[in-house]
């Protein structure tokens, strides 16, 4: 597999989703790092400085949209594109994207969309 | 709560007196009546059965007490000094309309009694303006109370509507998330097959099965609750061995716990216990309680104990999990209570399990109680009536 050299950080509290998204995106040649809670993810993003952050929305303690706001407030990771990756209703995701400084959204379960959109967001 | 529209009674129901006299009665006679009866305020003048005039106390006295009043009018028929065009209203007229008509009169006539007539224009009685106004203000106060009740109800309905839509948002996510997990894992399996990594397939199948099992449990809960709410849930009594179900549920719980360091034990002196109840519902109740224990316990143990007393069966599920806050205990058995903000919910699930458990126990004539220390663990205690071991219905 030819490596793209791009780093992706995936934050999701559901480990089943982390397993599949990691392997699917790795098979596309990306480096994939996973984290299973909102807590500690800002620090991780600062250390890793990934090229893209995939963010689950429904997470205990702090939701993905709340976390995206916090990340946007840190100057050193402010410019890393964030994409919501969620099982929520597509309309509500679209709405959420409008109100947060994030690049877009990917619906969980849309494997084709996952591969395509990640490639698109990495090479705009 | 049953009457919600403001009511305005008809005037016929508010008649205060039925005093009347012929138009030819002498003024003196009518004056005597007024003098003798302090409560008499007016007399209708009726010819045949039709009202043709009205004499009120203040107007008659005013006339008589003028200079030479008695001398001039005392012996004359009362009709000569009466109001011959008094306000006359049909008995079915609404109170508010009648008041409008009364107040529309010239200032000096405003307090004059109103004559009430029936369909044929026949005299029914008198009604005082004072009385009408009191009635109207009561009706108004009443309608304000009812408006308040109605507004409270609207608020309640809006609240229910809000909870419902929160629930739908939550359930949508709860249903979609495991399906998407299964799709993702299936994709991984496909990739394994394409690469020829057959040994990976088995692990992935296990994950898919656990995802599908989880999804089935959610769907079952949603369908069961609608069945209970529609009154379609049926209890079918059978003779069966409770301990066999207890052991089976304990085994399933171990699977649910996966790699968590939690020991599951069954604590009972009995190897077998024949009871008469609905085994499907009993298993569902135990699965719900043990499933909760597994979900909320990260280390320690979960104990399922069964004891028999005189006429009751006690089943306890004790865990060393996160426990339940006192303030959360009350709403625990209420449907959708886990529904808060779906986006930051701590644990997956629809929040329907305990509601269903409680409903099923009610149907079986049993009960459920809980004891919990936040941070220490929780004990749910189910009580079931023991029926005769032999099923002869």
Image: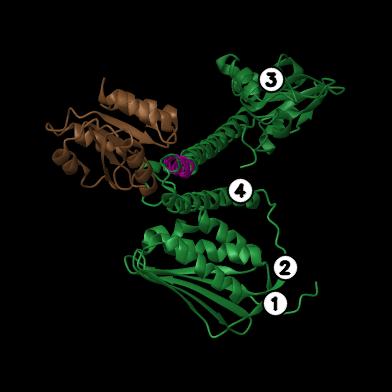
Chain colours: A brown, B green
In which image quadrant can residue B263 be found?
Answer: bottom left
Local SS, label 2: loop
Q: Which residue is mark 3?
A: B71
Q: Which mark is residue B237?
A: 2
Image position, residue B43 (x, y; %): 72, 27
- Distance from disc 4 to disc 1, alpha carbons, whole Å, reads 29 Å
The secondary element bearing badge 3 is classed as helix
Q: Residues within 10 Å of mark 3 (few under 14, many from 20)?
A: few
Q: Position of residue B186 (x, y in %)?
A: 47, 42
In percent of width and height, residue B234 lies at 71, 58
Q: Quadrant of the C terminus of chain B?
A: bottom right
Q: Are marks 4 and 1 on the same chain?
A: yes
The residue nearer to you, when weighing A15 against B273, is A15
The earlier-in-sequence mark between 3 and 4 is: 3
Please, which chain is the residue tagged with disc 4 on? B
Q: CA distance from mark 3 to mark 2?
A: 100 Å
Mark 2 Cα-neighbour bin, 10 Å: few <14, some 14–19, many ≥20: some
The answer to whether mark 2 and mark 1 are in CB contact below 8 A is yes
Regarding residue B243, the answer to whether it shows in the image is: yes
């Amino acid at each position: 597999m030819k490596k793209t050299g791009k780093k992706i950080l995936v934050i999701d509290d559901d480990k089943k989703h982390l397993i599949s998204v990691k392997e699917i995106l790795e098979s596309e040649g990306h480096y994939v790092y996973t984290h299973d809670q909102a807590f500690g993810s800002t620090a991780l993003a600062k250390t890793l400085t990934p090229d893209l952050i995939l963010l689950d929305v429904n997470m205990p303690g702090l939701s993905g949209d709340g976390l995206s706001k916090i990340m946007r407030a840190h100057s050193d990771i402010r410019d890393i594109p964030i994409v919501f990756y969620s099982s929520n209703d597509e309309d509500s995701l679209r709405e959420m994207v409008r109100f947060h400084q994030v690049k877009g959204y990917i619906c969980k379960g849309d494997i084709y969309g996952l591969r395509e959109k990640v490639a698109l967001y990495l090479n705009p | 709560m049953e009457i919600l529209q403001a009511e305005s009674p008809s005037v016929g129901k508010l008649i205060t007196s039925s005093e009347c006299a012929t138009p030819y009665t002498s003024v003196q006679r009518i004056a005597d009546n007024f003098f003798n009866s302090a409560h008499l305020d007016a007399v209708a003048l009726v010819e045949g059965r039709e009202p043709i005039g009205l004499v009120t106390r203040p107007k008659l006295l005013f006339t008589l007490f003028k200079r030479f009043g008695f001398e001039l009018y005392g012996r004359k028929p009362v009709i000569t000094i009466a109001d011959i065009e008094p306000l006359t209203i049909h008995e079915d007229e609404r109170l508010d309309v009648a008041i409008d008509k009364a107040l529309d009169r010239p200032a000096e006539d405003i307090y004059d009694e109103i004559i009430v007539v029936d369909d044929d224009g026949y005299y029914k009685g008198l009604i005082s303006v004072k009385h009408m106004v009191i009635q109207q203000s009561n009706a108004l106060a009443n309608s304000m109370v009812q408006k308040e009740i109605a507004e409270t109800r609207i608020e309640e309905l809006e609240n229910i509507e809000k909870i419902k839509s929160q629930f739908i948002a939550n359930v949508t996510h709860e249903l979609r998330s495991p399906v998407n997990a299964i799709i993702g894992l299936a994709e991984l399996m496909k990739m394994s097959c394409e690469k020829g990594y057959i040994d990976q397939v088995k692990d992935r199948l296990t994950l898919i099965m656990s995802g599908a099992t989880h999804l089935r449990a959610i769907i079952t809960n949603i369908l069961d609750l609608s069945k209970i709410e529609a009154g379609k849930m049926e209890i079918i009594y059978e003779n069966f061995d409770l301990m066999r179900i207890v052991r089976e549920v304990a085994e399933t719980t171990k699977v649910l716990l996966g790699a968590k360091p939690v020991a599951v034990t069954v604590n009972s002196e009995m190897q077998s216990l024949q009871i008469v109840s609905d085994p499907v519902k009993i298993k569902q109740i135990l699965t719900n309680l043990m499933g909760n224990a597994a979900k909320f316990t990260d280390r320690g143990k979960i104990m399922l104990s069964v004891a028999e007393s005189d006429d009751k069966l006690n089943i306890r599920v004790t865990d060393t999990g996160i426990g339940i806050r006192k303030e959360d205990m009350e709403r625990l058995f209420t449907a959708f209570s886990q529904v808060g903000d779906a986006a930051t919910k701590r644990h997956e699930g629809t929040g329907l399990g305990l509601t269903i458990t409680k409903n099923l126990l009610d149907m079986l004539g049993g009960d459920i109680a809980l004891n919990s220390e936040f941070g220490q663990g929780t004990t749910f205690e189910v009580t079931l009536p023991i029926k005769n071991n032999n099923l002869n219905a």
